[in-house]
Image (cartoon, rainbow, N blue to C red):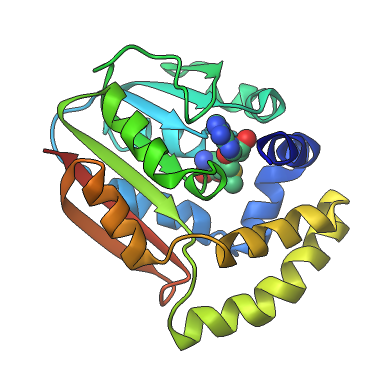
Amino acid sequence: MSEAVKALFANIAPKYDLLNRVLSARNDVRWRKRILGQVRGAPGDVLDLACGTFDLGLEALEQGKAQRVHGCDFCQPMLVAGADKRRGHPLSASVGDALHLPFADGSFDLAMVAYGWRNFGDPQASVRELARVLRPGGQLLILEFFRPTSWWPKTFYGTFGKVIFPLAGGALAGNASAYRYLNDSIAGFLSRDEADAVIAAGGFGKQRWESFFGGISHGVVAQLT
Ligand SMILES: C[S@@+](CC[C@H](N)C(=O)[O-])C[C@H]1O[C@@H](n2cnc3c(N)ncnc32)[C@H](O)[C@@H]1O
């Protein structure tokens, strides 16, 4: 499963940013900014897991929420696609898997994941792994699409998600099935309330949630207790 996900992202990597902007009508940029606004405290060492092309890490630096960012992703071509964007910024990168992070315990003050958690295979194990690499009192930020439970997100994903995502993916990235996977992976993932419980069970309290576009996407910042 994870090899198939890696191959999928490798295939769409050169067109990934373009598709994000088109499919979300640039809202993805706004949602990253908004959820970073929930991060509290002095800037420090930040992990951007499943960093893709570094949009979240760059925004964290822009907002002064990070001194240094380390981006980690299991798909090298995504890191390559974003390489020009991180040049000149205190943003390093490495290849690594979310369930076996190549970092010592207590390496970061803030660990972030935007639109990656859904792909990790084991949501609880990945939260435990993120908790491991955080320092005491560190913060976790997750931005994600969760399985819809109310009428508007269900309607959105059942129509726009089912039809337009694959059409746009086929037209702009030459890969309709990757964007079919996007919708299917959302339908098979945790609901927002289930995610809340998984994060709490991973040792995080003080969860601050924000909903975007009527619940199409959600973000949370929580603190290691
Ligand atoms: C939808 S993209 C999100 C990229 C970026 N965070 C953003 O906001 O645009 C999901 C990313 O998760 C990465 N990914 C998926 N499963 C992973 C895993 N098990 N370990 C590390 N990265 C993973 C993919 O390679 C891809 O770059």
Q: Residue 2 lies in what quarter of the image?
A: top right
Q: Residue at x 79, y 64 (%)?
A: 166
Quarter, ligand 1: top right
Q: Residue 188 vs residue 192: left or right?
A: right
| Quadrant containing the N terminus in the rendered view | top right
- Of 207 and 120, which appears nearest the observer? 120
Residue 161: x and y in percent read 66, 72
* Rendering coords of residue 78 (x, y %): 66, 31
Quadrant of res 141: top left
The image shows residue 94, relative to residue 77, as above or below, that is above
Q: Farthest residue to the bottom: give it.
A: 151
Residue at (66, 45) in percent of width and height: 17
Residue 69 in sight in this render: yes
On the rendered image, what quadrant is the C terminus found in? top left
Residue 51 % position (x, y): 52, 33
Res 38 seen here: no
Q: Quadrant of residue 168?
A: bottom right
Q: Position of residue 24 (x, y in %)?
A: 59, 63
User: In the image, what residue occupies the spot 31% across and 38% down?
Assistant: 63
Q: Is residue 147 left or right of residue 132?
A: right
Q: Residue lying farthest top?
A: 104
Is residue 83 or residue 11 the one in the foreground? 11
